[in-house]
Amino acid sequence: MQNFVISITPSMGFAFCDDYNVDVRNLLKYADGAMYQAKQNGKNNYQISQNR
């Protein structure tokens, strides 16, 4: 049996909301944009959405 090494480099995006009237689709869009920003910053990273 052979041993394999798997390396995982997660990129996560976070979006927070302090307004109960926010549209869920927009909140997910902000988190998705933050995730892609984290990927641009070198992967294995996280980014918090600046859209509030």
Image (cartoon, rainbow, N blue to C red):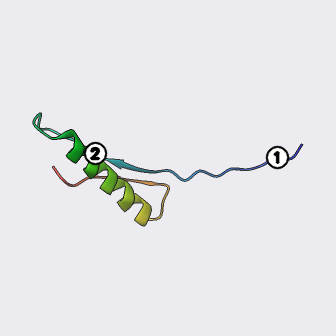
| Tag 2 secondary structure | helix
Asked if disc 2 and disc 1 are in contact, CB closer than 8 Å, the reply is: no
Dot placed on the residue nearer the N-terminal end, 2 or 1:
1
Circle 2 or circle 1, nearest the eye = 2
In the rendered image, residue 8, in percent from the top left (x then y), is placed at 59, 50
In the rendered image, residue 44, in percent from the top left (x then y), is placed at 50, 55
Disc 1 marks which amino acid? Answer: Asn
Q: Quarter holding the N terminus?
A: top right
Q: Residues within 10 Å of mark 2 (few under 14, many from 20)?
A: some
Could you say which disc has been placed on residue 52 in the image? none
Query: What residue sits 27% from the left and 50% below the top?
Result: 29
Disc 2 marks which amino acid? Answer: Leu
Q: Quadrant of residue 17?
A: top left
Query: What residue sits 33% from the left and 52% below the top?
Result: 32
Q: Which residue is mark 1?
A: 3
Could you say which disc has been placed on residue 28 in the image? 2
Q: CA distance from mark 2 to mark 1?
A: 38 Å
Query: What residue sits 82% from the left and 46% below the top?
Result: 3
Using residue 13 as the reference point, say whether residue 10 is left or right of it.
Answer: right
